Image (cartoon, rainbow, N blue to C red):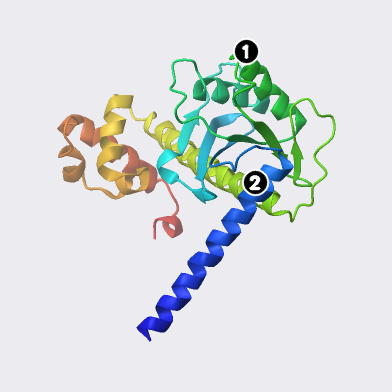
């Protein structure tokens, strides 16, 4: 049984290895690369109508996710605000930060993949050209609707089938970049919503909010805490703990009985 299970595992690993190699060879072919792309980076933007705008950078090495190299970005552009989202500007910011001249070139990717179409790719290439890296980096974009691959300066996508092994690899990277961006966006949005509730408590500044959230992990757990538990939080004190406790329990007392139950 052990021998049979070992054979199954070896066959699975070999199949995955063959699949990755076919994907890398396919991608090298459609992008006309001289060598197999060992490191590929994927980028995506996530927000809800311009709120809590974040970006993700995922890294695949030899066709597999290398999560130790993943990065998350909070968009700093003051023009990107609630109701005024700008994916082009957000992507341009992320790429300028990732490939800033102060960064080492030792970990530069063989392929940079942007989630989007011609517009997103054009915004990124403007930054790449300003940095003088257009000859060093292979940059492409993958549009969601038809899984079309765009190259810089091309008016039409590459003539590739969406089931082509190289395109399938790009899709896996795109989906992972999207997943990672969305998870960070949800985390940031949750933090903002919790802070907005705590902002209503008189005398509870951001630093003390952080102390409470570090201890109780969420507003809901804080709501369920006793006065003694809140007061025992370092840096809070008895008087502020009473304000926090009464804030939540005054609100609870105004709710219908069915809700409290």
> For numbered disc 1, what is the local secondary structure?
helix
Give the Cα distance between marks 2 and 1.
26 Å
What residue is shown with label 2?
A: 170
Asked if one can make out residue 47 in the rendered structure from this viewpoint, the answer is no
> For numbered disc 2, what is the local secondary structure?
helix
Of pointers 2 and 1, the one earlier in the residue sequence: 1
Vertical arrangement, residue 228 with respect to residue 15, above or below: above
The percent coordinates of residue 78 (x first, y second) are 56, 16
Residue shown at 34% from the left, 42% from the top: 248
Residue shown at 43% from the left, 22% from the top: 104
What residue is shown with label 1?
A: 130
Give whichever of 233, 180 is nearer the camera. Answer: 180
Task: Point out the image quarter for the C terminus.
Answer: bottom left
Q: Which residue occupies the extreme front position in the image?
A: 34
Q: Tell me if mark 2 has few (under 14), some (14-19) or many (20+) residues whose alpha carbon lies within 10 angstroms of its own.
A: many
Q: Tell me if mark 1 has few (under 14), some (14-19) or many (20+) residues whose alpha carbon lies within 10 angstroms of its own.
A: few
Image quarter of residue 251: top left
């Amino acid at each position: 049984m052990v021998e049979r299970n070992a054979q199954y595992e070896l066959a699975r690993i070999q199949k995955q290895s063959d699949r990755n190699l076919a994907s890398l060879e396919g991608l090298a072919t459609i992008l006309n690369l001289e060598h197999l792309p060992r490191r590929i980076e994927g980028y995506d933007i996530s927000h809800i109508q311009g709120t809590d705008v974040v970006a993700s950078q995922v890294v695949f090495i030899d066709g597999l996710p290398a999560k130790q190299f993943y990065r998350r970005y909070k968009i700093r552009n003051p023009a990107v605000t609630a109701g005024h989202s700008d994916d082009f500007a957000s992507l341009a910011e992320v790429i300028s930060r990732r490939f800033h001249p102060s960064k080492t070139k030792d970990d530069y990717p063989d392929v940079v993949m942007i989630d989007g179409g011609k517009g997103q790719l054009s915004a990124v290439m403007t930054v790449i050209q300003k940095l003088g890296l257009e000859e060093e980096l292979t940059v492409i974009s993958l549009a969601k609707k038809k899984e079309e691959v765009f190259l810089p300066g091309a008016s039409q996508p590459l003539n590739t089938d969406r089931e082509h092994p190289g395109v399938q690899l790009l899709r896996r990277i795109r989906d992972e970049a999207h997943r990672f961006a969305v998870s960070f966006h949800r985390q940031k949005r949750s933090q903002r919503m919790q802070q907005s509730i705590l902002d209503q408590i008189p005398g509870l500044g951001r630093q003390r909010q952080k102390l409470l959230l570090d201890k109780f992990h969420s507003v809901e757990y804080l709501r369920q805490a006793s006065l003694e538990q809140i007061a025992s939080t370092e840096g809070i004190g008895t008087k502020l703990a009473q304000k926090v406790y009464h804030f939540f329990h005054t609100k609870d007392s105004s709710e219908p009985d069915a809700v409290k139950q």
